[in-house]
Image (spheres, rainbow, N blue to C red):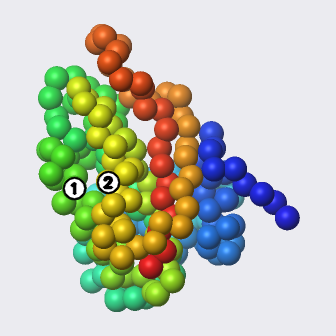
Amino acid sequence: MKHYKSVFENEQELLKSLIDIHLQGKDIECDPMYFKGNFYKDGVNKPKYKFDINPQVKDCEKWDACNLRLKVGLGKLNNLILDPPFLFGIHGKTKDYYSSKTHTIYKDFNNLKSDYYSLLCEAMASLKKGGILIFKCQDYTDSKTTMTHALVYNWANEIGFYAKDLAILVKPNKIYNGNTAQRHLRKIHTYFWVFKK
């Protein structure tokens, strides 16, 4: 029997471990923030339902994840994954970051909070009882640190999810501004929460 660690350096290995343990080896069923489908390679199969607010590939349907229940129905999904943007507050050099050019940046923290809460509510409504939500998030430092992963835990708990597990992905090439004096540790890791309805 294979045993998995909680910290990974490869996103597909992390996802395969979550699929094995928490989805009993069944594929991720729905990804309403599919983007280019970068999760799905090296043995991680594409989901049955692929949506994105701005699809980048042909086999992905245009749909807003904040209205997921209208697309898939109430209590229909066994599992889903969410990978929302984590940057907020456009100012200074933020607009020059690679992620700023390829992903959404929230206007401010309140926009991030509102969107994340809506996404969690849609996941709760769309999942069957006992269904699993995998939620990818990242803490963010821009003059001050926002411990987003802790906030996601609190919001999910408030909505009624049980935090079943947490995996951490370490990626050393994360965003930073080399022209400023360092006042915080560079955040080179992301979190994959596993929530159960």
The correct choice, above or below, for 149 with respect to 97 in the image is below
Disc 2 element = helix
Label drawn at residue 78: none
| Amino acid at dot 2 | Leu
Q: Determine whether, in the image, residue 91 is placed left or right of residue 27.
A: left
149 vs 188: above or below: below
Tell me if 113 is positioned left or right of 170 in this view: left
Labels 1, 2: front one: 2
User: Is residue 5 or residue 62 the one in the foreground?
Assistant: 5
**Where residue 86 sits in the image (x, y, percent)?**
32, 45
Under mark 1, the amino acid is: Lys
Work out which quarter of the rendered image holds the C terminus and state it. bottom left
Q: Does residue 90 appear to the left or right of 161 in the view shown?
A: left
Q: Nearer the viewer, residue 146 or 18?
A: 146
Q: Residue at x 62, y 62 (%)?
A: 18
Q: Residue at 48% of width from left, 74% of height from top?
A: 196
Whether residue 181 is visible: yes
Q: Is residue 84 visible?
A: no
**Picture quarter containing residue 32?**
bottom left
The residue that appears at 41% across and 73% down in the rendered structure is: 161
Marks 1 and 2 close (CB-CB < 8 Å) = yes
Q: Residue furthest right?
A: 1
Q: Label 2 belongs to which residue?
A: 151
Identify residue for label 1.
Answer: 113
1 or 2: tag closer to the N-terminus: 1
Q: Residue 92: which quarter of the image?
A: top left
- Measuring from the top left, give residue 12's x and y in whole percent: 62, 51
